[in-house]
Each structure stands twice: as C-alpha cells, then as structure tokens.
Amino acid sequence: MNFPSNLFNSHSKEDGNFFLGVTKILGFKPKNLKIYKKAFLHRSANKKDEDGNPMSYERLEFLGDSMLGTIISKHLYNEVPLGDEGYLTKMRSKVVSREHLNELGKDLNLIKFVESRIPKSHFGDNIHGNVFEAVVGAIYLDRGYKYCEKFISKRVIEPYVDIEQLEGRVISYKSLVIEWCQKQKKTFAYTVYEDTGNDSLKHFAVKLSINKQVVAKARATSKKKAEELASKRAYFALQDKIQKS
C-alpha cells in the first residue's frame, strides 16, 4: 500500500501510526486525518476547536447513525422487494441495534484509538458502537457517500446481513414478553428487589411478575440489563405459549 510521501515528514510519529491504523480499519486512505481524530475523541478529553467549541465524537456519531440507517435501508429495500414498511423497519432495527453496533466496534478494536481521561476499562459496552457510528460519520465528511457505502458494505452488510438469520433474530425479549402480555390481557410488572450479594460492583436484581406470579428473576449491572435478562428467561419458560398465541 502506497502512502503519501510527505506523511511522516509533515506529521508526528503518533499521527503516522494513527494514519496506518485508521487506513487498516477503513480499507482506504483517509484524506483529512483531523476528522478521524475527532471520531475517537471522548468528551472527557476536554478538547476544543479553534473557536473554543468543545470537541468529541458525539456529533460525528449523530451523523454516522443517520448514514448507517440510510445505507442499510437502501440495501434492504433492494434485497427484499416484497417487504412492507413495517417489515423493513424491523429488519433495519436488527442490523443497527445497539448490541450489534457494539459487536462491530469490538471486532475492529476501535477503543484502542479513543482519546480520553477516563481509563478504558471504565467504559461501558456502548462506547464501541458509539465510536463505530462516529467513524461512519467521519468517512462521510472526508470521502462522501460512495466511500461510506463501501465501508458499510464491507464491514456490516457482507459479513452480517443475512435476511433469513435476521428474521429470526430477537432484538428485545422484554418487548416480546410485554407484547404477549398485552395481547393476552395479562398484567405484568418488573420490580427491583433487595440485593444482598457481596459483589464489589453494584448489581440490580429484578423480578418479572405476570398476573402477580413471579416467572423470572435476574441480576445485572444496570436495571435495564436485568429487566432484559429476566425477560429472556421468562420468554424461554413461556416459549410454547407465546409462539402459539
């Protein structure tokens, strides 16, 4: 791979290493390295631009989220000509789910380049997906729509978007359980109960009750995760009933 002859003369060694790393991730050479640096800049770094405005990857993340949704929508529209709006929306949600984007960010080891004042071990899983979206936004600003589409096709669509597998993929067990309860006119409640564990990391314990009977319990590092895990356990416990309804 040929790099600009003046790259290592006009930039620091750190910039050169970053250029090489980003080029490997993208599959092509970036033109404006500053845009990609911003894609890996966490707000805790407290960096500002020439006008004194705070800088972080969050604005690029917003742009990348839109580009990702548009390109995946176009792909699904072309691949599933009989899919109606509801079907296509559901399929797109599965591709761009937070869980899936986090997996993509981890596969590319994007966190390696993140600049922050917070130890990387303290970040939650969402940083991986957030930075992935920011990189997509940076590609769009640096190279335009075609290169953005090329990257998403290579990194997302080709390896991960299989229509049949997506149809069977569950985004949220909590949504499935709630939908079933509402359809069957059953009452349901998620309740945080006292956790007496000795874990050094705080956990939330949640129980799911249907028609006032506890059907599943779960513990996780956040209430949201505990509710989803309890819902997953409830779904498999009630799978025959849910699938027949």
Image: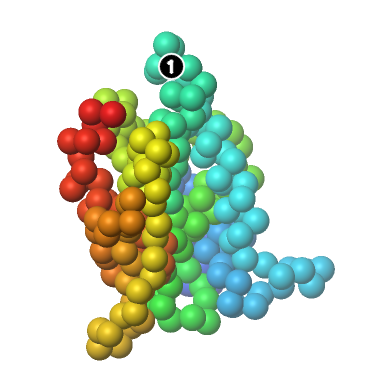
Q: Quadrant of the C terminus?
A: top left
Residue count near mark 1 (Cα–Cα under 10 Å), binned few <14, some 14–19, many ≥20: some
Residue 209 x, y percent position in the rendering? 32, 57
Residue 21 x, y percent position in the rendering? 41, 59
Vertical position of residue 16 compared to residue 25: above or below: below
Report the residue marked by disc 1: 83
Vertical position of residue 115 compared to residue 77: above or below: below
Residue 44 x, y percent position in the rendering? 58, 77
> Which one is nearer the viewer's eye here, 145 or 169?
169
Vertical position of residue 146 compared to residue 58: above or below: above
Residue 199 x, y percent position in the rendering? 27, 85
Q: Residue at x 44, y 55 (%)?
A: 129
> Which one is nearer the viewer's eye here, 101 or 229?
229
Whether residue 216 is visible here, answered yes or no, is yes
**SS of the residue at dot 1?**
loop
Q: Residue at x 51, y 39 (%)?
A: 68
Q: Amino acid at mark 1?
A: Gly
Q: Is residue 83 left or right of residue 9?
A: left
